[in-house]
Image (cartoon, rainbow, N blue to C red):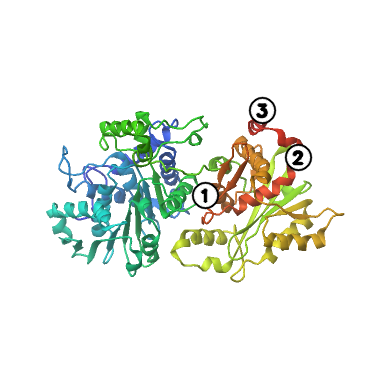
Amino acid sequence: MTRRKPATPSPVTATGHARDYAAVALAYAKAAVADKKQRKYCKFVRQAAQRHLDDLKRSRRRNYPYRYDEWHANDVCDFIEKLPHVEGQWETPNLSLEPVQVFILATVFGWRDKATGLRRFTDVYIEMARKGAKSTLTAGVVLYCACCENEPGPLILIGATTGAQALKVFKPARIMAMRSPALQEAFGLQVWAKSITIADNAGEIQTINSKGSTQDGHNPHVAVLDELHAHKDRALFDVIHSADGSRRNPLYWKITTAGFDLHGVCYEQRSYAAKVLEKSLAAEHFFAIIFTLDEAKDFKPERKTGDDPYDEANWIKANPLMPVTPSLAAMRRQATGAKGAPGSEGEFFTKRLNKWMGAASAWLNVSKWIACSDPTLTLEDFRGLDCYIGADLSNVDDLSAIVLAAMGEDDRLLVKSWFYCPEARLLREDATTKQATEMYRKWAKDGHLVTTEGDFIDHRVIEAQIRDLKEQLAVHKATFDQWNSGLAMASRLNEDLDDGGQPFAEQMSKNANNFTDPARDIEARVTAGAKRLRHDANPVMTWMIGNAVVDRRINGSLLPKKVTPNSQNKIDGVDAMINATKPMIQPDDIDNTLDDFISQMKAA
């Protein structure tokens, strides 16, 4: 079982492997993208597939840093299909990968950095309903990475909330190794009760549990986090990720089903994954795929209702290995039990259909927001127009935002944004804010995020920008958030820019009464498309658009907000945009319903 690239192609495949797995992965991706009615593939799977196809096109460019290597794509699959089954009765003695499994493996291991040849993806998030063979697949990945990635002393950690849960992955890996004499001989594997060692490269596979305070000091090549939804805190997650940077090509492999805790680390990672898939966040190192049922808003065009959870034709979307596992009979029993006992319905939806219970509804469709982007939008486009500024200021070291808005020709809203944070924020190294810090650094490097000197946000820089906009353009009003920083800046601006008794700057409290009308106006424009909204494609704003969820009231009012008050997924730009557009809403417009407004825009 040597894993060296052959000097000459094998007669079976051009890469010397048993099957052309790269072709299987490509066919799977094309089938998912072609399923436009989303009968078998949910929105997230289709987005993951489209990402792979788009990247294949991008890889032809000389300046694109990654390439797709079919040998590596095939090798991991070929290795795993040489491993034996560990339980149940099967037609063949060894594992046989399904197309969806091939797609995941070929994508994660096939994409390579052009300069180094190392894996592109170092972070993997797989969310799938129960009984989807996630642990078996992961056991194969664990053995492959321990033996075949040319890493000196690879430490493979399998982590979970309890030792028993960690064994769900370690036990099949242990049995596979015990039943594979050729594997033992090829790499010097020795199987112990609680570990597996690899003599050839001094590697080791072991388990850890969620007592994070006792797990410091590890330096893993691969870290598996099983059933991430069950982690009641982020201790183990943070400890594992705190070693990032010590290995040349680490792999953080997270597998889970949906859960109920919307404030935990799993839902945080799930939200991050969704943003990567919908392209509101660029993270080239992060592979994500989510198998679930679609909500009404996930279809194009949007439907009145989402997937019926009791229609068995929809079950394959959350259970891509059906009917291999779970069986159709087992799913029918679960569905019957859920129907007959309402208390069991939540468990059926969450564990068998991979639906997060109690998840907040996203405010705007990010794809439609992106469709309204225009990176060529400049201040010149605002000259001669009545302009308005909205601002949302932080007090210490958080993000601050200002938005310039104006109504252009043909009732088209123009939006340009600026974002700020103190430079010290970019120096943070703590694991809890690692992902956000990496984004901030990239945005600052690319000129989308302005940093101010010191540990705290320098409001003088923001105020200077507002004054400059006022001097250059016909800015009639600046509207700030309700907090003390906004009050102080508004007071200073009014001292100098008071226009005949009418204050230039004012504050507005964030509540449904103030936010509903401008938010509904923005909703309608995003739905109508680029003919009604044009923004400057700032990736910070796009990220924040994807972060905003909405609280819709019975009386028709609404309030965009963060998913949780302490979430690291910020929406300052969203609030600033609403602050900017609020003074632009005319009293006569308020009586229109959202549906009426959308109809008017589409008819125009």
Give SS at disc 1.
Answer: loop
* Quadrant in the picture for residue 449: bottom right
Give SS at disc 2.
Answer: loop
Image spot of residue 580 (x, y percent): 70, 49
Q: Amino acid at mark 2?
A: Gln
Image spot of residue 454 (x, y percent): 60, 71
Q: Which residue is mark 3?
A: 603
Image spot of residue 408 (x, y percent): 73, 42
Give SS at disc 3.
Answer: helix
Viewer-side label of 3, 1:
1
Horizontal placement of 242 versus 516: left or right? left
Horizontal placement of 241 versus 203: left or right? right
Q: Which residue is mark 2?
A: 586
Structural crowding at the residue carrying mark 2, measured as other residues with C-alpha within 10 Å and reported as few (<14), some (14–19) or many (≥20): few
Image spot of residue 61 (x, y percent): 46, 50
Q: CA distance from mark 3 to mark 1?
A: 34 Å
- Taking depth in this image into account, of 201 and 585 the one nearest to the observer is 585
Q: Quadrant of the C terminus?
A: top right
Q: Which residue is mark 1?
A: 563
Q: Amino acid at mark 3?
A: Ala
Pick out the residue farthest to the bottom.
454
Q: CA distance from mark 1 to mark 2?
A: 30 Å
